[in-house]
Amino acid sequence: MLNQLTLTGVGPAQRLLIHFKPRLNFLTGDNGLGKSFVLDMAWWALTRTWARGVMAAPRQDAADESSIGYSYMGSKGAPDDYADTRPFDHQAQQWAISQGRPAVPGVVIYAGVDGSFSVWDPARNDWKSDKRETATPNRPRSFDFTPENVWNGLQASDGKTQLCNGLLHDWVLWQEGRKPAFDDLVKVLDALSPSGVEKVQPGTPMRVGDSVRDFPSLRMPYGQDVPLIHASAGMRRIAALAYLLVWTWREHQLACERFRVDPAREVIFLIDEIECHLHPQWQRRIVPALLNVMDALTGARSVPVQLLAATHSPLVLASVEPSFNPENDCIWDFDLIDGEVHAHLYPWSRKGDVNAWLASEVFNLKEPVSVQAEEALGLARGFLRTVALTQHALTDPQRQQLQDIDNKLRASLSDVDAFWIRWSQFRDQLAGRA
């Protein structure tokens, strides 16, 4: 599990220090403040590779020597955390890598907002000796899937070795061959379903158009099977996530048998915009589902999950209120202060509903309403404070201002908005003044 990340002279801030908790870690804040960047750095700290092959460069205005510091607990439960700080080698134009073999953090899965995935498997990507390096010169340092690779397969850099057959091939192969992997896929899809009523279930493989290829399908709540390639963006994202989880864990187990090593004891999920493409019903359930998905996949509570997720969704945060524990979970809020990005640990408290989360410091909305309604409410409250202090009759400009504000409120607020009670009483009192 990742414990800490210290970024100096790299990224949106001169220095950024983040302590992670062992279960839920949410990254919140406005666009462009570095949430995705922190996920990229977390991936590098855990795997020593760059997701999507793009290296983070140091800041040109770095006040100190640029470095990436990190610590995590090895998967074998070592009493001491593995900690390291790696400087940027300006001559080699890369981040220096320590020669010693670090502790294994577990299986790491990174889901990008664009549908890409990266997978780091300690049994397939982390070799224990130089012998395997010689025997397998083309071994991947990680499995990096573009959206196309997820669906149609991934090859090694030699252009010959097939690393993954892809969702469209494996799904049909597993289903028609009645493979145990398909049973796992059904369990994971069920665990990730939005509700007890709308289950995500595989349908019968079918052909599309003139193609002789069989494609996976999903059985819709209304009883019809729809080809997966024609399903909604949200369903395709869930299906891709379910497939990558099953594929990763299945291949991990096979590799452990082949190389005679112990299976990983932890899984770390890095997810950028966890709510992407998901209906509010799914946004409320995706985090609890991910925490339970390994239980569904393994049939036991023996594989703990750490989640690092960037989010803009108040529903996601509201959904974890019943189970949030500050000892195991946290929220890091990114803000721009005096032109510098700062991240602070948000003090946890239950808000009770989504509107309260929207109006909290996490999302920084003055009012959980439209921009026009927010403006009207601001004018109304300001008018209330100003005029309520006086006892004399309204002047003509004040009466016009009252009418203008009333019109704006009527145009932007619901007829049953709670503010109407206060405003209506105030407006009627003013109308009664001589």
Image (cartoon, helix red, strand yellow):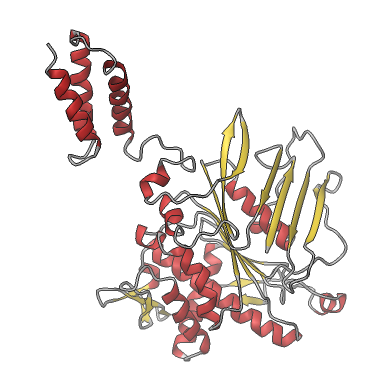
Q: Is residue 251 above or below residue 13?
A: below
Query: Position of 63 compared to 409: left or right?
Result: right
Of the pair 110 and 353, the residue shown nearer to us = 353
Q: Quadrant of residue 23?
A: bottom right
* Residue at the (27%, 16%) spot, across then down: 387
Q: Quadrant of residue 42?
A: bottom right
Q: Is residue 147 above or below residue 19?
A: below
* Residue at the (64%, 77%) spot, across then down: 162
> Can residue 151 be seen by looking at this rendering?
no
* Residue at the (39%, 67%) spot, across then down: 235
Q: Position of residue 303 (x, y in %)?
A: 61, 76
Q: Position of residue 275 (x, y in %)?
A: 45, 56
Q: Quadrant of the N terminus?
A: bottom right
Query: Position of 427 compared to 170: left or right?
Result: left
Q: Position of residue 289 (x, y in %)?
A: 47, 69
> Can residue 230 be seen by looking at this rendering?
yes
Q: Quadrant of residue 120?
A: bottom right
Q: Is residue 315 above or below residue 187?
A: above
Of the pair 135 and 368, the residue shown nearer to us = 368
Q: Position of residue 338 (x, y in %)?
A: 60, 27
Q: Quadrant of the C terminus?
A: top left
Of the pair 316 and 14, the residue shown nearer to us = 316
Label count reads 0
